[in-house]
Amino acid sequence: MIRYKPLAEETARHIRRKLSGLPEVGLITGTGLGAGVPEMSATVDFDYRDLPHFSRSTVAGHPGRLSVGRVADRLVMACKGRFHLYEGYDPLEVTFPIRVMQELGVSRLIVTNAAGGLNPDFAPGDIMQIRDHINLTGANPLCGPNENRWGPRFPDMSRVYDGELGALAQRKATATGVTLRQGVYTGLRGPSLETPAEVRFLKIIGTDAVGFSTVMETIAGVHAGMRVLGLSTITNVNDPDRPAPATLEEIVAVANAAAPRLAAVLEAVIAEI
Ligand code: HPA
């Protein structure tokens, strides 16, 4: 079995050598949301290919770059492009960037994603603050021997998404003129999209938005003791009684269009985080 801590330490060392300070805030961006990262100054960029032990992004809409830079007074480490279970990565590979953040001392984690809306009040282009999640991937990044230096064997999950960060995001969205929805995100393994029967099931169990990411990284972030803020961009709304095809092109296009609003909210949030 691979022990990931020494690998994450080595990646963190590689990054730290090029930085003059340590990042406090980590950001993982979703499909088509590379432009959902706020403007950063004094940025140091890394291609995932040049980082030891980092995997590669294989999906359109995920550039595969890591940038560390300043937003207001905060040093932010932004991973533009994430790894998904459906790409064949295992949960420890998917969450490796979070562990590198942990090794660098990141204490607050912002995860964004593109998601399908199931709540009929939602419209494409809406942004949803994730209030809670349901992990239906069948996977968990904490399976296997616990790395006690990273976190506890059985982390509490009663307050996964930080209430204060959520409230801050709501306030800043209002101030920025962005309506921020709230809801439960269900993570599936993918990559096949949901059947109408699955959509019906997901609605019954309390899903407001569904996607193929985020829950692995969030679980690792909680294990790492990070305060987590999750924001979903609703790229399409799934109605089981009127099923309509969703394509990656559409998803990326709607995510791209929503990205500047997401960036505006995140910029305001990070300034006060
Ligand atoms: N299902 C799963 N993931 C998604 C969707 C969807 O409808 N839209 C964007 N990501």
Image: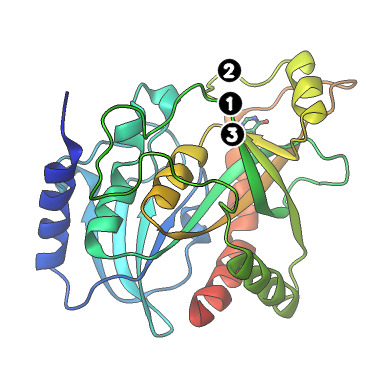
Spot occupied by residue 108 in the image (x, y as percentages of width and height)? 43, 65
Q: What is the tally of numbered marks visible in this picture?
A: 3
Q: Earlier in the sequence, mark 2 or mark 3?
A: 2
| Nearer to us in this view, 236 or 55 | 55
Q: Which mark is residue 192?
A: 2
Point 46% across, 54% down: residue: 34
Element under disc 2? loop
Say whether residue 244 is visible: no
**Circles 1, 3 touching at the beta carbon (< 8 Å):** no
**Circles 2, 3 touching at the beta carbon (< 8 Å):** no
Kind of residue at badge 1: Leu
Give the residue pinned by disc 1. Answer: 136
Q: Which mark is residue 249?
A: 3
Q: Quadrant of ligand 1?
A: top right
Q: Report how far apart the C-alphas of labels 2 and 1 lie in the structure.
A: 14 Å
The quarter holding residue 161 reads bottom right
Mark 2 sits near ligand 1, with its Cβ under 8 Å away: no
Q: Report how far apart the C-alphas of labels 2 and 3 lie in the structure.
A: 15 Å
Point 11% across, 44% down: residue: 6
Point 56% across, 74% down: residue: 269
